[in-house]
Amino acid sequence: MRSWLLLTVLLPGLAAASPGQEVSLGSTALVLTNGGAYNVTAPRVALEAAWSLETGAWRVGAGVRWAPAGQGSFPLELYARGLLSTRVGHWQPAVGPELGLSGLPVIRPPRGGLPEDLSERQAAQLGPAYVALHAVPLRFVFGRFTASALELQWGTSLNRPGSTLRLQLGLLHLGMTL
């Protein structure tokens, strides 16, 4: 029953979709942790620039995030994502996977030997690659211009899934179709 309801929402948007390239700028807040509730980094605000290509119901693209404040020798992230989207009037929500490389520090030094803390040996095994589920529930299209707010992302490192957690909240993104 739920799949039929989903199809009734998706099909009108699929028929109305047309291919187009989009560039966007925005800001996002990232929270990174290494497994325990006691070892969470402070939220970092990042600036984001992205490009995407819309082909039917899919929007594929890539981008870069820059989070200058806080620790980290290379406060940059590069990512690629594929989002399944639909369009109902001006509203165009989307959801899909994101793969990326991050220079942001996920690991903080252990604070007190709690079971949730990763040892330094375990921390050294973590790589910069991550995978995440990205959801854009509040995206709106007005002619050539787009605006989205409160984008949500939940992910983990690729080489040790579940050992780290990344939560991201897209604050505001503004885009333009070329």
Image (spheres, rainbow, N blue to C red):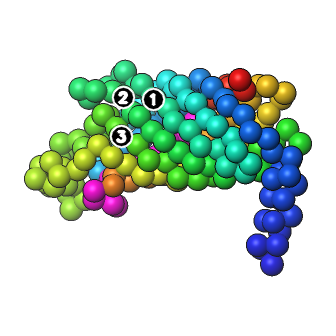
Q: 45 left or right of 169?
A: left
Q: Nearer the viewer, residue 146 or 149?
A: 146
Tell which residue pokes out farthest to the top in this image. 68
Q: Amino acid at mark 1?
A: Arg
As helix, strand or loop, the secondary structure at mark 3 comes to strand
First in sequence, mark 1 or 3: give its number: 1
As helix, strand or loop, the secondary structure at mark 2 comes to strand
Instruction: Identify the residue at horizontal 17%, vertical 52% (top origin).
Output: 125
Q: Which residue is mark 3?
A: 101
Q: Amino acid at mark 3?
A: Leu
Q: Nearer the viewer, residue 126 or 57?
A: 57
Tell which residue pokes out farthest to the left in this image. 121
As helix, strand or loop, the secondary structure at mark 1 comes to strand
Say if the magenta span includes residue 100. Answer: no
What range of the chain is rendered magenta?
A: 159-171
Q: Quadrant of residue 109?
A: top left
- Name the disc covering residue 65, or none: 1
Q: Amino acid at mark 2?
A: Leu
